Image (spheres, coloured by chain):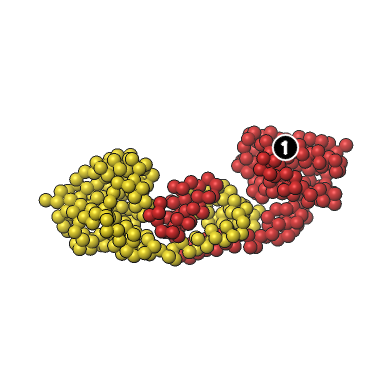
Chain colours: A red, B yellow
Amino acid sequence: VAILPQPILEVIESLSSLPGIGPKSASRLAFHLLRLDDNTLKRFGTQIQDLKNNLVTCQRCQNIASNDPCDICRDSSRNQSILCIIEDALDVVALEKAGHFKGHYHVLHGLLSPIDGIGPAQLKIAELEKRLQTEKIQEVILALNPTVEGEATVLYLTKRIGALISVKITRLAHGLPVGADLEYADEITLARALEGRRIVKSSE
Amino acid sequence: VAILPQPILEVIESLSSLPGIGPKSASRLAFHLLRLDDNTLKRFGTQIQDLKNNLVTCQRCQNIASNDPCDICRDSSRNQSILCIIEDALDVVALEKAGHFKGHYHVLHGLLSPIDGIGPAQLKIAELEKRLQTEKIQEVILALNPTVEGEATVLYLTKRIGALISVKITRLAHGLPVGADLEYADEITLARALEGRRIVKSSE
């Protein structure tokens, strides 16, 4: 498509590199952008440029946030004794929307996946261990996707946490269809999965 | 989703406003952007900001281009006597990819659609009339989408051009499925549609 001017080609190329956007969709999106008024276009570009500028990692839960500690970690009305371990920030959004969980979170920023070179050192597991040793946690919920990587991470964390402290470890009930993605689950399914969580290892 | 920091929410909102991107896709895209390295993210933002900066409208064919006149209008090897009228720049890309047409283009930048407030004055029809009066054009191809708006525009232009000059007016053959979009047609279908173009009004 050397028929199009360079600036349009560049935007199409960048858009095509995003997940789920093919070359045809990218072209349509680029031409949609061309039809936006100048201010809207500038604002959109600036938003993308500045996306990371005002974001920090909460040193407690490791979530991406506007401030450190984040609003959830600051919230004294939440139950300090239950810690929910999730893969990424969108899972926090999904669980908060479900509205059923009132404890704290710990974001791993990924799941174990040796094929992709993601081992325990690439995840926020050292930070998790520090929390488990310093905070008075009575239950750890492993709210990970029911995929191969999620299962592997559940097994690994169960063993590692169990070796560290005596704590109840639970996982989400199989209300989630196996192979699906946690963040796409509806609120009710997520709430059920939380209610029906099973003990992987009791604290005794 | 007030759980997410403001900069992420803003990007999600802007992405959601794009055609074909819902709130869930927008969230996933925003988190994909967060995982890009700083340089890639800055470059993407800059590309969007600068998208329109180096673009001009070719004063001959009205296409969006890097220079005026555009590369196609400058190309002396193309047939100056055949003018292909299309809705927008993506149709030029589609026809150029089909590789069958070697004449010139005129971009209307839309189709007649009274419901949306798009009348002849909103399209590049005055510019088209000027070209028809000054250039030695022997055939006008109305390569417009076979939709209600496309049909209306074909009828209107046939009448208006016919009143202005004596010229052969053709339209693309119905190789295109009715209701579909020209720019999604495959190369062969587009080439067939060009070969089988029918006379709407002969030059006599």
Q: Amino acid at mark 1?
A: Ala
Query: Seen from this angle, which residue lies furthest right?
Result: A204
Q: Position of residue B195 (x, y in %)?
A: 25, 42
- Image quarter for residue A34? bottom left
| One can see residue B76 in this view | yes
Q: Can you identify the residue that label 1 sits on?
A: A152
**Label 1 residue SS:** helix
- Image quarter for residue A154? top right
Q: Is residue A139 above or below residue A1?
A: above
Q: Is residue B145 left or right of residue B33?
A: left
Q: How many marks?
A: 1
Residue for point 62% across, 56% down: B37
Write down the chain letter for disc 1: A
Residue for point 19% across, 59% down: B136
Q: Is residue A133 left or right of residue B149?
A: right
Q: Is residue B99 above or below residue A57?
A: above
Q: Position of residue B103 (x, y in %)?
A: 26, 53
Nearer to me, A143 or B92? B92
| One can see residue B120 in this view | no
Q: Position of residue A51 (x, y in %)?
A: 60, 60
Residue for point 62% across, 40% down: A181
Residue for point 20% across, 52% down: B139
Neighbor class of circle 1 (other Cα within 10 Å; few <14, some 14-19, many 20+) is some
